[in-house]
Image: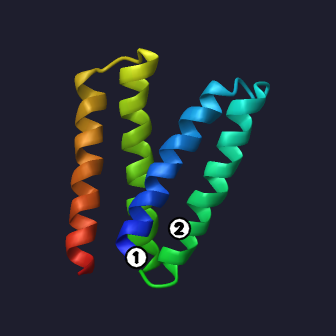
Amino acid sequence: MIWAQLVIAGLLEVVWAFTMKQSDGFSRTGYSIVTILAMIASFWLLARAMAVLPLGTAYVIWTGIGSVGAFVLGLTLLGETASPARIGAAVMIIGGIILMKISSS
């Protein structure tokens, strides 16, 4: 259950990163509200995970999901550049998340 909460926290990090970008510096109310609510929920679930999991494990997985998720949304929805180096970096982050999970079992 704690791992599911950590994954949801990471996905909510993707939501708030994307909606923060869409809020245009918090000048668009709807996106700003979603950003703040997703932040609160994401941090709350992360805090719950950190009560059980080691700090390094929980934080690395949370930030990794958020980083790769934001990268994918940037590519697919915002037209950001998909250079080989950026894709390689995302693949390494995913590898790090998997290794962190395996080593924490």
Q: Residue at x 52, y 83 (%)?
A: 51
Q: How is the image coloured?
A: rainbow
Q: Is residue 71 above or below residue 63?
A: above
- For label 2, the crowd category at 10 Å Cα-Cα, with few meaning under 14, some 14 to 19 and many 20 or more, is many
The residue labelled by disc 1 is: 2
Which quarter of the picture shows residue 98?
bottom left
Is residue 82 found left or right of 24 in the rendered image? left
Residue 72 placement (x, y as % from top left): 36, 32
Q: Position of residue 42 (x, y in %)?
A: 56, 58
Most distant residue in the bottom direction: 52
Residue sitting nearer the eye, 93 or 44: 44
Whether residue 73 sits left or right of residue 18 in the image: it is: left
The quadrant of the picture occupied by the N terminus is bottom left
Asked which secondary structure carries label 1, the reply is helix
Residue 53's disc number: none
Q: How many angstroms separate mark 2 from mark 1 (CA)?
A: 9 Å
- Label 1 amino acid? Ile
**Which residue corresponds to the image point at 58% horizontal and 43% vertical from the top-left?**
16
Residue 14: tell me if it is visible: yes
Total labels: the figure holds 2
Residue depicted at 26% across the width and 69% down the height: 101
Residue 65, compared with residue 23, is above or below; it is below
What residue is at 57 percent from the left and 73 percent from the top?
A: 47
Q: Amino acid at mark 2?
A: Leu
Assign a secondary structure to mark 2.
helix
Tag 1 or tag 2, which sits nearer the N-term? 1
Mark number, residue 46: 2
Mark 2 vs mark 1, foreground winner is 1
Q: Place residue 48 in its image quadrant.
A: bottom right
Visible residue check, residue 26 = no
